[in-house]
Amino acid sequence: MQQGPQYPYPQQPYPQQQYPGYPPPKSGGKTVLVVVLVAVGVLVLAGAGVGAFFLLTADDKPSTAAPPTTSATGEPDKYTSLPRCSEVGSRMKNLPPLTRDDAPEPAGGSDDQLEMTSLSCSWMKSGSSSGTVTMYLSESKQKGSGAGTRYAAAGYENAVEDGAKPITAGIGQATKAADVDFDSGRTLQCGVRFYQGNVDVIVIVSAPDETDRDIARCRRNAHNLAKAASESLS
C-alpha cells in the first residue's frame, strides 16, 4: 500500500525527496533509470541499430566499417502541451467544484535531456468524493530520441513495481494504466497511474467521509476521472 496525499492535493503520491519536481524513475535495483538516462543521445556502445565503430587494424588504419552515428532513435513525442483543468473536468459528469486550477508550468526537475511541464487540478466539496489529477509532460530535447515517452513510461512501470495492478480493459486512450492503492488512514482513497505517449498522469479519488468504505465505487470514480484526463490530451 502506498501513502496517499491529503486533500486538497498538497503533494504527489510519491515521496518528494525521491522525486524532486517530477517523478523520475527509480535509481536502484531495476533498469528503468538506465533506459531513460543512458539511451538518450548516449547510445554509443549498444548495437541497437546505431552503426558500428571504426575498427583499428594492427597498423592503426581504420577498417571499412560504417562510421558511427551518435543519434538515438525512439518513439517521437506525441504531445507538446497539457490541457487546462477545466478541460479535464468538462469530460466527467457530477464532479464537485474545481478548487485547484493551476496552469501548466515548467517543472523544476527539467534537465539537459528533457523539458518537463506539470499540471495540478483538484475538485472538492464537503460531503462528496474529491479528486485530483496531476500530469507531467516530458519532451525530448533531442528530437526523435524517444526520451520523453520512455520517461513517461517509467513512472507507470515504477508504480506497477510498487504494487499497482495493470488495468487490462484500458483507460481512455492511455498507453497503459494501473490501479493504485493508498494507505490513507481514516479516509478511503484509490487512484490510477497511467501514461499516454510522453505524458505521465496520476489520478487520486478520496471518499466523502470516514464511513464510506465502498472501494468499488472509489475505483469507478477514479477510472472515470482518469478517462476524462486521457481524453483531454490533444
Image (cartoon, rainbow, N blue to C red):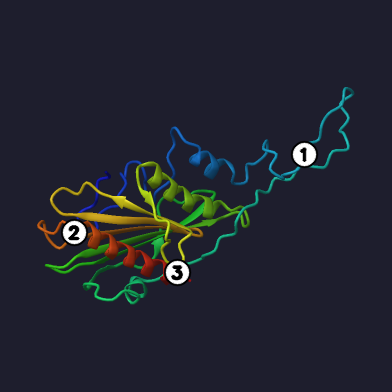
> What secondary structure is marked by label 2?
loop
> Reading the chain from its start, which is encountered first: label 3 or label 2?
2
Residue bearing mark 1: 52
Q: Is residue 105 visible?
A: yes
Residue bearing mark 3: 233
52 lies left or right of 111: right
Going by the numbered disc 3, the residue's amino acid type is Leu
The quadrant holding residue 129 is bottom left
The residue positioned 62% from the left and 46% from the top of the image is 41
> Reading the chain from its start, which is encountered first: label 1 or label 2?
1
> Reading the chain from its start, which is encountered first: label 3 or label 1?
1
In the image, residue 206 lies at what x, y percent? 21, 59
Question: Are dots 1 and 2 in contact, CB under 8 Å?
Answer: no
Residue bearing mark 2: 214
8 lies left or right of 192: left
In the image, residue 181 lies at what x, y percent? 28, 49
